[in-house]
Image (cartoon, grey):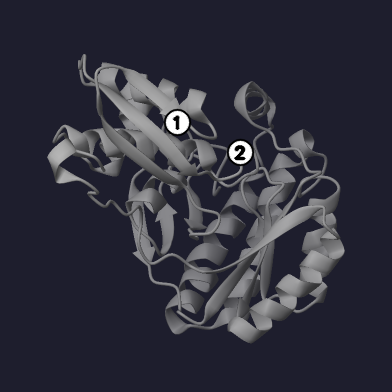
Amino acid sequence: MLDLRGSLGRRFGGIGAGVFDPSLVIEVERAAAVEAEGAEANRAVEFARRYLASQGMREGARIVIRHAIPGHAGLGSGTQLALAVARGIAELYDLPTDSATLATAVGRALRSAIGTWLFDGGGFIVEGGRREDGDRIAPLLARLPIPDSWRCVVALPWSGESVSGESEVQAFRELPPPPLEEAEHVAHLLVMSLLPSLVDGDLESFGRAITTIQRINGGWFAPAQGGPFASGASTELIRKMSGWGAAGVGQSSWGPAVYGITEGDARAAELAASVRGALNGGGVVYVNQFARTGARVSVLDPATARA
């Protein structure tokens, strides 16, 4: 996030990028009532009912979750599930499918809109924060492609705990506003270092900027998570990935998921192997190119309106 102060009339703001592993895969088909099966089935039912109610619909949907993103790990699983369910139903009933409308319908993007805009499309994105006096989701300001050769190694330690749900609401309520000079420093790094480095394909400069932004940002959340990064394995993994040569390191949302950015498949494989050794079976590691697209929809059976 870019600014927790809100002194200019907008609060939060953010930067982010998407990956496809771990991924969410669901099937949705028309039904008389709402039902779901698979991991996070109860949440899927809740999101489906919320979306249908927002459209004033009495119809239902059957949802099958084939593959789920680990929950409460800092990977945006709730937002992706909510938007996927809403998008699937919207496709079935020929309703608007733009991501901002879907997010509003299912009650997402109340703070960060990163997950919404990444569902909408890939690349590296910048969003402009929410107005204190409005209810629209944060606007998308920029979407830039990430070089094909860059890799993101994501580590998810099983032992970590994430701030989520009511504890997250309480944390945001109690977090002190950061010093103005720190918010200004983050904005300066973003505009004059991070984004130009991305356009130039300069991974070394990009990595330095993202690591610095993450450490400043983490300090804002330290009162709620015990330090700049989630306590335990997450903090140690970030330190080690930096020592192992990752160009940039950081934590995804509240963690415990952390990441290291590097160049090329061979270097990414080396970094991933070192991380797996450090986890010693106590977590999972994903190696990714950055996503160039958002959510993908396939019609499986037009005759039964199944998507």
Total labels: the figure holds 2
Is 177 rendered above or below residue 243?
above
- In the rendered image, which residue does mark 1 sit on? 110
**Residue at 38% over, 22% down:** 35
Q: Mark 2 points at which residue?
A: 71
Quarter of the figure that contains the C terminus: top left
Task: Identify which residue, 277 or 193, lies in the foreground.
Answer: 277
The amino acid marked with disc number 1 is: Leu
Which residue does the image show at 86% across and 48% down from the upper left?
Answer: 232
At x 67% / y 83%, what residue is drawn?
267
Local SS, label 2: loop
Label disc, if present, on residue 298 of the rendered structure:
none
The residue that appears at 24% across and 43% down in the rendered structure is 98
Quarter-of-image position of residue 80: top left
- Which of these two is toward me, 127 or 153? 153
Where residue 140 appears, as percent x and y from the top left, is 34, 51
* Residue 131 sits in quarter: top left
Answer with left or right where residue 227 lies relative to residue 120.
right
Sequence-wise, the earlier of marks 2 and 1 is: 2
Q: Position of residue 74 (x, y in %)?
A: 62, 44
In front here: 304 or 227?
A: 304
What SS does tag 1 mark? loop
Badge 2 amino acid: Gly
Mark yes or no: residue 279 visible. Answer: yes
Residue 276 locus on image (x, y percent): 78, 65
Q: Which of the two discs, 2 and 1, sits closer to the camera?
A: 2
| Front residue (pair 214, 95) | 95
Q: How far apart are marks 2 and 1 (CA)?
A: 18 Å
Relative to residue 205, is residue 255 depicted above or below? above
- Other residues around mark 1 within 10 Å, as few (<14) / some (14–19) / many (≥20): some
Q: Quick check: 136 above or below 251?
A: above
Q: Can residue 137 be seen in this view?
A: no
